[in-house]
């Protein structure tokens, strides 16, 4: 009798495992096919000037858009994640050093990556937030490219990307922005220039960089990955609604909230937000205060 129960529980357990394995197999094949797909987009021409004003603007944008968080301080690339569950994800060495971008990587290739989320051959870029960079104005994108083209060459050869089961499953359920190419409205025309006046409009443009974590409505939500803190509501409905402009600036510059909580840069990238100008932070403040 006992034996028989064991036998049946064994069979049921095995069937469950087999079912999960089959389910995972389908997910892995799905993500693999989607990342192996090739795309073709119409060429977009941008006037990429190399004057000092454009270059310093590009430098500032690279700092506040978090390019260095993933591609490293000197943009020479780095292994962002390396574990058995998530996989190994390297962010490209963006310099022309060994292991970096090909010598003939041109303006068009830069635009294709930032606007469409694919490389020069039409292969989808993995985990590169092109669904955010595609919303940059033409002026800003041109400034970023101008700056990046002039950074010193650094030798850094990185291992290729290999996706693990957690990355596959999270992407399948749209919990991880793995394939930005699929999230972009490729027909949407780029705006020429963003609002330069301090205020809600400028804040809305800048807030694209916060939407990846704080969500599209900025109301926050579940932690981005197990073990991380939940993401707070940063509209006027959250704590921010009670903060003065000065307290908001202080929080984004030091990572310390008015309540005295020191945020970790790994959870909330305040070392990036610290580099926004006063005007930019004031615009962000006004924008979030205007959101309910
Ligand atoms: C969340 C991390 C992350 C951020 C932030 C990020 N990147 Fe990337 N980027 C990646 C990864 C990962 C890849 C490699 C994708 C691949 O090879 O599939 C990549 C690839 C690229 C490529 C494509 C190179 C090629 O093969 O054609 C360019 C260009 C690029 N990034 C520029 C930028 C710039 C400029 C910024 C800032 C505006 C930026 N990235 C911000 C993660 C990031
Ligand atoms: C990589 C994900 C990520 C990005 C990008 C990000 N945040 Fe955050 N943010 C978080 C997390 C997670 C917390 C909560 C940290 C904690 O509890 O320690 C947080 C906390 C905050 C807080 C504190 C809110 C409170 O109620 O205490 C503010 C303000 C904030 N973020 C503003 C911004 C702004 C503005 C941007 C864009 C310029 C931004 N964040 C971009 C993840 C992010």
Image (cartoon, rainbow, N blue to C red):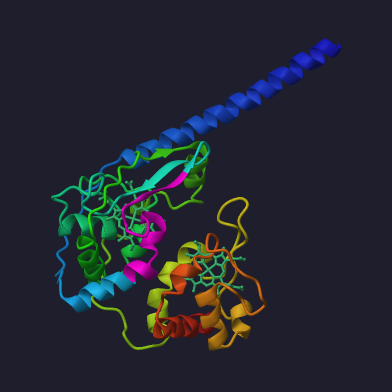
The stretch of residues the image draws in magenta is 61-81
Classify residue 76 as left or right of residue 174: left
What percent of the width, then of the height, locates residue 93? 29, 50
**Residue 280 painted magenta:** no
What percent of the width, then of the height, locates residue 264? 57, 63
Quick one: 232 or 217, which is closer to the camera?
232
What percent of the width, then of the height, locates residue 99? 26, 44
Q: How many marks?
A: 0
In this rendering, is residue 55 above or below 118?
below
Residue at position x 47%, y 82% in the image: 287
Task: Say which quadrant the N terminus sits in.
Answer: top right
Residue 259 visible in the displayed image:
yes
Quick one: 136 or 104, which is closer to the camera?
104
Task: Say which quadrant the C terminus sits in.
Answer: bottom right
Residue at position x 20%, y 63% in the image: 150
**Residue 80 painted magenta:** yes
Q: Quadrant of residue 151?
A: bottom left
Q: Quadrant of residue 17?
A: top right
Residue 42 visible in the displayed image:
no
In this rendering, is residue 252 above or below 282?
above
Seen from this angle, which residue lies furthest right?
1
In this rendering, is residue 165 above or below 187?
above
Residue at position x 62%, y 60% in the image: 229
In this rendering, is residue 211 above or below 76?
below
What percent of the width, then of the height, locates residue 204? 41, 77
Classify residue 90 as left or right of residue 84: left
Q: Quadrant of residue 59?
A: bottom left
Quadrant for ligand 2 reads bottom right
């Amino acid at each position: 009798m006992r034996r028989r129960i064991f036998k049946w529980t064994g069979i049921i357990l095995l069937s469950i495992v087999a079912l999960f394995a089959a389910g995972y197999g389908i997910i892995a094949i799905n993500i693999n096919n989607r990342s192996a797909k090739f795309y073709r987009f119409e060429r977009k021409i941008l006037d990429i000037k190399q004057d000092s004003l454009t270059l310093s603007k590009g430098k500032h944008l690279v700092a506040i858009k978090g390019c260095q968080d993933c591609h490293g301080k000197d943009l020479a690339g780095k292994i962002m994640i390396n574990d058995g569950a998530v996989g190994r994800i390297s962010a490209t060495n963006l310099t022309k050093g060994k292991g970096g971008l090909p010598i003939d990587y041109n303006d068009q290739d830069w635009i294709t990556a930032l606007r469409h989320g694919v490389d020069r051959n039409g292969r989808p870029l993995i985990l590169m937030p092109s669904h955010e960079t595609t919303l940059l104005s033409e002026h800003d994108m041109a400034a970023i490219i101008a700056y990046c083209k002039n950074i010193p060459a650094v030798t850094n050869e990185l291992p290729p990307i290999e996706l693990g089961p957690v990355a596959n499953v999270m992407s399948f359920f749209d919990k991880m922005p793995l394939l930005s190419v699929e999230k972009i409205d490729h027909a949407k025309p780029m705006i020429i220039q963003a609002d330069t006046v301090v205020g809600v409009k400028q804040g809305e443009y800048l807030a694209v960089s916060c939407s990846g974590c704080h969500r599209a409505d900025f109301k926050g939500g579940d932690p981005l990955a197990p073990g991380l803190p939940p993401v707070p509501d940063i509209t006027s409905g959250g704590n921010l609604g009670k903060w003065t402009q000065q307290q908001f600036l202080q929080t984004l510059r030091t990572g310390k909230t008015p309540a005295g909580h020191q945020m970790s840069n790994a959870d909330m990238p305040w070392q990036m937000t610290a580099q926004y100008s006063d005007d930019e932070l004031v615009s962000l403040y006004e924008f979030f205060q205007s959101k309910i």
